[in-house]
Image: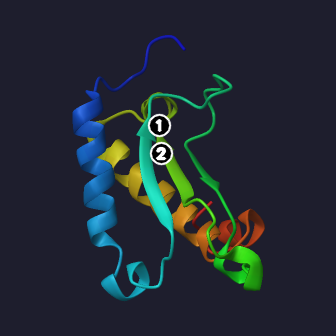
């Protein structure tokens, strides 16, 4: 992927993801169902422009046949995030936006609407 402007260890990045999750209202987190959060260095396809990814079935799309499904996955990608940031403060902000963005997908909110709301 090349050099990134911000040098940050995987451990520190994971801390920032945890801190971003701590900022999500408890009432909202309590509505989340069958979802796990992961941190990886980069997307499986090696791209450097994807900061986060929601994989699963949004709450709004779950029907009677959803029982027994594997957990949804929200993955935050460290190296692409560091690539678009100029400072640790930028990383903190970008991680927070990415976490909210991916959680919104779990609730069935699409990219178009997230961009309209300023969470794109």
Vertical position of residue 91 compared to residue 59: above or below: above
Question: Mark 1 sits on what residue?
Answer: 81
Q: Is residue 8 above or below residue 81?
A: above
Seen as rendered, the residue at the extreme top is 2
Residue bearing the label numbered 2: 76
Above or below residue 43? Residue 120 is below
Q: CA distance from mark 2 to mark 1?
A: 8 Å
Closer-to-camera residue (61/5): 61
Residue 96 x, y percent position in the rendering: 40, 58
Specify the quadrant that holds the N terminus.
top right
Residue 28: image location, x then y, percent: 42, 83
Of the 4 image quadrants, the one containing the C terminus is: bottom right
Of the pair 34 and 19, the residue shown nearer to us: 34
Q: Which of disc 1 and disc 2 is earlier in sequence?
A: 2
Nearer to me, 1 or 86: 1
Image coords of residue 10 (percent x, y): 29, 30
Q: Is residue 59 left or right of residue 94?
A: right
Tag 1's secondary structure? Answer: helix
2 vs 43, nearest the viewer: 43
What element does badge 2 sit on? strand
Q: Image point 64% across, 67% down: which residue?
A: 105
């Amino acid at each position: 992927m090349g050099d990134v402007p911000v040098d940050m260890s995987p451990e520190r990045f994971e801390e920032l993801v945890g801190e971003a999750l701590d900022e999500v209202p408890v009432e909202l987190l309590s509505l989340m169902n069958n979802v796990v959060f992961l941190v990886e260095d980069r997307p499986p396809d090696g791209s450097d422009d994807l900061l986060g990814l929601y994989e699963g079935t949004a709450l709004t799309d779950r029907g009677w046949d959803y029982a027994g499904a594997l957990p949804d996955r929200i993955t935050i990608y460290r190296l692409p995030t560091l690539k678009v940031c100029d400072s640790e403060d930028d990383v903190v902000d970008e991680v927070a936006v990415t976490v909210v963005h991916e959680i919104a997908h779990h609730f069935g909110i699409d990219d178009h609407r997230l961009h309209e709301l300023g969470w794109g």
